[in-house]
Amino acid sequence: MKKNRIVTISREFGSGGRTIGRKLAEELGVPCYDSELIGEIARESGFAEAHVRRAEESSPSGWAGALFSTNRAFGPTNEDYLWEVQRRVILELAEKGPCVIVGRCADYILRDRADCLTAFIHADLKFRADRIVRVYGEREASPEERVRDKDRRRAAYHRFYTDMKWGYAKNYQISLDSGALGLDACVAILKRLY
């Protein structure tokens, strides 16, 4: 086994990918980076954590979004700067030691590493909608619409900065249905692959 074995977990909203990542890291005895990445990116960039958190959900999608919703004609935007800081932080963490990294395009950023296992966690809409109500509580918008909206934003962000289709099975080494398998089974499968 390579000394700096990394697992990246991309996930649909409500699929339990964050929970799977944390449990996997705990069982492997390695750090899990998720919201901790936001704090590190904020420290390195000088932006507030709330801005860093929102940046992942506000990236333009498609050529029209890139042209009209940002000022790229005058050079890189704040979002582009945050992407570079995020990329650097993830590469540094991967060099530091074995870990699990949840989200933030880590699968793409670490794509050239032979010691990186890339996973995508998904589930059907009903499972995810029910789960977000249990985990995050009721909100004004319907749970199904919250799931769809968050997934659209993640997909747009991923596509914009990676030019890859988010959630497309061929872009990951393994894709797991957490609704059908259960979160603990997903952890067990990833642990075995690790």
Image (cartoon, rainbow, N blue to C red):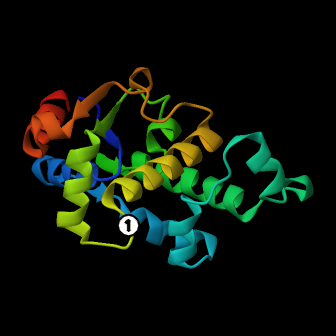
Residue placed under numbered mark 1 in the picture: 36
Whether residue 43 appears in this view of the structure is no
Quadrant (top left, top right, bottom left, bottom right) of the N terminus: top left
Image quadrant assignment for residue 98: top left
Q: Residue 107: give x, y in percent of width and height.
A: 44, 38
Q: In this view, does 123 lie to the left or right of 50?
A: left
Quadrant showing the C terminus: top left
55, 68: nearer the viewer: 68
Q: Which residue is drawn at 33% across and 43% down?
A: 9
Does residue 111 appear to the left or right of 180 in the view shown?
right
Q: Where residue 96 appears, x then y in whole percent? A: 39, 51
Q: Is mark 1 on a helix, strand or loop?
A: helix
Q: Is residue 154 left or right of residue 157?
A: left
Query: Is 2 placed above or below 146 here?
Result: above
- Asked whether, in this view, residue 142 is left or right of residue 21, the answer is right
Residue farthest toward the right in the current orientation of the protein: 74
Question: What amino acid type is highlighted by mark number 1?
Answer: Glu
Relative image position of residue 153 (x, y in whole percent): 52, 52
User: Residue drawn 29% across and 26% down?
Assistant: 174
The answer to whether any part of residue 99 appears in the image is yes
Image coords of residue 183 (percent x, y)? 13, 45
State the residue at coordinates (59%, 63%): 55
> Against 36, is 118 above or below?
above
Instruction: Tell me the crowding category of disc 1: few under 14, some 14 to 19, or many 20 or more residues within 10 angstroms, Cα based.
Output: few
Give the total number of marks visible in the rendering. 1
